[in-house]
Image (cartoon, rainbow, N blue to C red):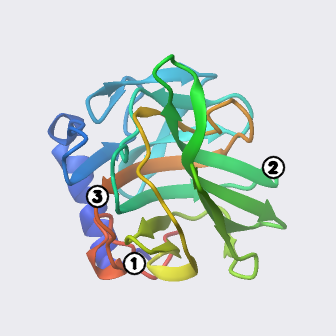
C-alpha cells in the first residue's frame, strides 16, 4: 500500500507539471525534478543515451532504464554550493547487475572535465533484493553509507533520501534511517547530473525513476518533500 502522504505529494508533483518545477538558481532553497517526459526535466533539456522509455507509476509517468545502455544527462548539479542538503528520490529497482549507480551529481572543472567530487545514489542487488548505497566524495572527504543487512524487495516503488546537517551524513529508505556517519563535507562546485548510470557511463540501472527533490537544508523524515512514508509501494 502507498502511504497517504507519499501518494498525495507524488500526485501533486504530477498535477503541477514540469513548467511549474523549473530549475531554481544555486541560491534557491529547493529544486524539483519530475521524470515524466523525455524532453525536459525541471526546465532543463534532457540529453538521452540509449533508449529510456516512459512507464507508469502511482503518481503518473516515470522514466524506465533497461540496465544496459539507457541514461539521462542534465546540465546541472542541483546541490552545487550547498553547505547542508537533502537529496530525495522516488524510484523502482527491478534487479539486474549487482552494482548500480543510478543517480549521480558530478562536479565539472572550469575546463569541462569531471573532477573527483560527486554525490551518488547507488544500490546493490542480489536474490530479488536490494539495499541502498549513498556516497559523497570531495576534497578531504569520502564516505559510503551502506548497510547490507537492511534489504528490500525489487519490483516496488521506494522513497530514498540522503542528508547532511553540517556534521552528520545520513541515508534513509521510506523515512527509516539506514546508516549515518560524521563527514567533513565541503560544498561542491557546478556540474552535471546523470540518471540511469554513473556519469562516466558504467554501472547502469535497471528500473524506473519518478522524481527527485534537492533541498539546501537537512530535513528530518517528517519534512521530506516527497513524503518518505514507511511503507513501500506495490
Residue identified by numbered label 3: 216
Mark 2 or mark 1: name the one nearer the start of the chain: 2
Q: In the rendered view, does 63 fall on the left or right side of 28?
A: right
Mark 3 or mark 1: name the one nearer the start of the chain: 3
Residue at figure coordinates x 20%, y 45% from the top left: 27
Describe the element under mark 2 as helix, strand or loop: loop
Which quadrant: the N terminus?
bottom left
Q: Are marks 3 and 2 in contact (CB under 8 Å)?
A: no
Q: Which mark is residue 82?
A: none
C-alpha span from label 3 to label 2: 32 Å
C-alpha span from label 2 to label 1: 27 Å
Q: Is residue 175 above or below residue 70?
A: below
The picture quadrant where one finds residue 126 is bottom right
Q: In the rendered view, does 117 fall on the left or right side of 163?
A: right
Q: Nearer the viewer, residue 101 or 65?
A: 101
Outermost residue to the front:
140
Residue identified by numbered label 1: 229
Q: Position of residue 4 (x, y in %)?
A: 30, 77
C-alpha span from label 3 to label 1: 21 Å
Q: Are marks 3 and 1 in contact (CB under 8 Å)?
A: no
Q: Position of residue 183 (x, y in %)?
A: 53, 69
Q: Nearer the viewer, residue 3 or 171?
A: 171
Residue identified by numbered label 2: 97
Q: Residues within 10 Å of mark 3 (few under 14, many from 20)?
A: many
Q: Are marks 2 and 1 in contact (CB under 8 Å)?
A: no
Q: Position of residue 36 (x, y in %)?
A: 37, 39
Amino acid at each position: 500500500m502507498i502511504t497517504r502522504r507519499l501518494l498525495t505529494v507524488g500526485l501533486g508533483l504530477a498535477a503541477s507539471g514540469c513548467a511549474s518545477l523549473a530549475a531554481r538558481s544555486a541560491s534557491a532553497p529547493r529544486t524539483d525534478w519530475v521524470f515524466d517526459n523525455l524532453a525536459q526535466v525541471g526546465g532543463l533539456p534532457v540529453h538521452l543515451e540509449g533508449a529510456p522509455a516512459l512507464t507508469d507509476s502511482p503518481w503518473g509517468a516515470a522514466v524506465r532504464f533497461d540496465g544496459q545502455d539507457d541514461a539521462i544527462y542534465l546540465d546541472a548539479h542541483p546541490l552545487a554550493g550547498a553547505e547542508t542538503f537533502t537529496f530525495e528520490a522516488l524510484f523502482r529497482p527491478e534487479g539486474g547487475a549487482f552494482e548500480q549507480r543510478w543517480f549521480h551529481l558530478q562536479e565539472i572543472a572550469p575546463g569541462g572535465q569531471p573532477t573527483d567530487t560527486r554525490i551518488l545514489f547507488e544500490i546493490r542487488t542480489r536474490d530479488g533484493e536490494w539495499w541502498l548505497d549513498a556516497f559523497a566524495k570531495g576534497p578531504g572527504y569520502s564516505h559510503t553509507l551502506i548497510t547490507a543487512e537492511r534489504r528490500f524487495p525489487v519490483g516496488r516503488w521506494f522513497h530514498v533520501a540522503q542528508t547532511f546537517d553540517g556534521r552528520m551524513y545520513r541515508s534513509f529508505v521510506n523515512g527509516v534511517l539506514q546508516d549515518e556517519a560524521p563527514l567533513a563535507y565541503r560544498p561542491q562546485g557546478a556540474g552535471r547530473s546523470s540518471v540511469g548510470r554513473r556519469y562516466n557511463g558504467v554501472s547502469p540501472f535497471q528500473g524506473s525513476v519518478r522524481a527527485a527533490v534537492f533541498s539546501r537544508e537537512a530535513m528530518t523524515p517528517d519534512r521530506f518533500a516527497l513524503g518518505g512514508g514507511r511503507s513501500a509501494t506495490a
